[in-house]
Image (spheres, helix red, strand yellow):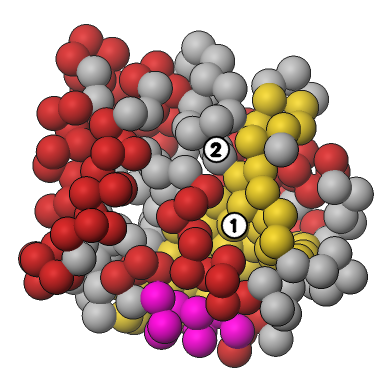
């Protein structure tokens, strides 16, 4: 299904479960799409009205020319809720989606009951590195980047034992629109919420992967130290922890949100 944001961009979204249940909005990581949440959709649709969407620049959503900003990505999430007439929801985002969740916790807390942010940081990576990656994919496309992604996303053991899943995610990344991906890299380049974390007062669950080379357990601890309402959970996983440890991830969501 498609909805239009306030700036006339079409976002693709999917809903699962009973609309009478509490709403739970999922936001994907950079280079993936809504389908990355399949284990969570299957496990949680009995208890929640689950909405997952493709971040602008990704999947079946529009890919307007960038750069994008974190504020815009946060506003997009609010547009999804608005299009469905949902006044208040839970939220779960990973990596880029997790950073979006931190923005929502700071700037739109009245729209959310509880927020889960996984494998993220208040400042993800280095500004110059993101800008360099944006320039690279605009020049060279997505294929070479996709080849190296599994080593950033998963532990070696998981890669060896889950060839089909890893190949599917790699193919999804290779097929992403280079401009949309680059524009999101530019959003990550400028995004820095470190000085605003103390404003977060709503319940926040911060999930980290103990083998994550991108957003470390130390990054997650920094969020929790700044937010009195936050609690930390570390999983035996790398960067895409919801897929590497789906059972533990789902159990944590159920426990925190219910």
> Which residue is located at x 41 percent, y 36 percent?
188
The spot of residue 50 in percent (x, y) is: 69, 63
Residue 59 to residue 164: above or below: above
Against 12, residue 63 (above or below) is above
Quarter of the rendering occupied by the C terminus: bottom right
The residue that mark 2 highlights is 55
Q: Is residue 137 left or right of residue 58?
A: left
Q: In terms of image quadrants, where is residue 232?
A: bottom left
Seen in the picture, residue 136 relative to 254 is either above or below; the reply is: above
- Residue stretch rendered in magenta on the structure: 246-254
Point 68% across, 21% down: residue: 9
Q: Is residue 251 magenta?
A: yes
* Residue 33 percent coordinates (x, y): 47, 43
Q: CA distance from mark 1 to mark 2?
A: 10 Å
Q: Residues within 10 Å of mark 2 (few under 14, many from 20)?
A: many
Q: 170 left or right of 13? A: left
- Count of numbered circles on the image: 2
If you read the primary sequence from the N terminus, does the residue marked by circle 1 or circle 2 appear first?
A: 1
Q: Residue at x 86, y 55 (%)?
A: 86
Q: Residue 54 magenta-drawn?
A: no
Element under label 2? loop
- Residue at point 14% right, 70% down? 161
Disc 1 designates what residue? 26
């Amino acid at each position: 299904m498609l909805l239009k944001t306030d700036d006339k961009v079409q976002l693709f979204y999917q809903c699962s479960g009973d609309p009478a249940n509490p709403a739970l909005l999922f936001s994907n990581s950079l280079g993936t799409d809504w389908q990355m949440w399949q284990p969570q959709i299957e496990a949680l649709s009995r208890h929640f009205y689950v909405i997952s969407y493709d971040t602008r620049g990704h999947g079946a959503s529009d890919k307007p020319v960038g750069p994008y900003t974190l504020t815009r990505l946060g506003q997009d999430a609010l547009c999804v809720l608005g299009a469905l007439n949902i006044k208040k929801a839970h939220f779960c985002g990973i990596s880029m989606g997790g950073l979006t969740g931190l923005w929502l916790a700071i700037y739109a807390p009245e729209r959310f009951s509880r927020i889960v942010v996984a494998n993220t940081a208040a400042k993800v990576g280095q500004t110059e590195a993101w800008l360099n990656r944006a320039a690279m994919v605009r020049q060279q496309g997505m294929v070479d980047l996709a080849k190296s992604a599994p080593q950033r996303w998963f532990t070696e053991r998981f890669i060896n034992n889950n060839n089909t899943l890893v190949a599917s995610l790699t193919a999804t990344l290779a097929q992403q629109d280079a401009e949309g991906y680059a524009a999101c890299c530019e959003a990550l380049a400028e995004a820095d919420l470190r000085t605003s974390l103390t404003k977060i007062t709503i319940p926040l669950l911060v999930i980290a992967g103990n083998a994550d080379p991108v957003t470390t357990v130390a990054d997650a601890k920094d969020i929790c130290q700044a937010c009195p309402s936050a609690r930390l959970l570390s999983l035996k996983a790398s960067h895409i922890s919801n897929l590497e440890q789906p059972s533990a991830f789902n159990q944590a969501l159920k426990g925190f949100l219910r």
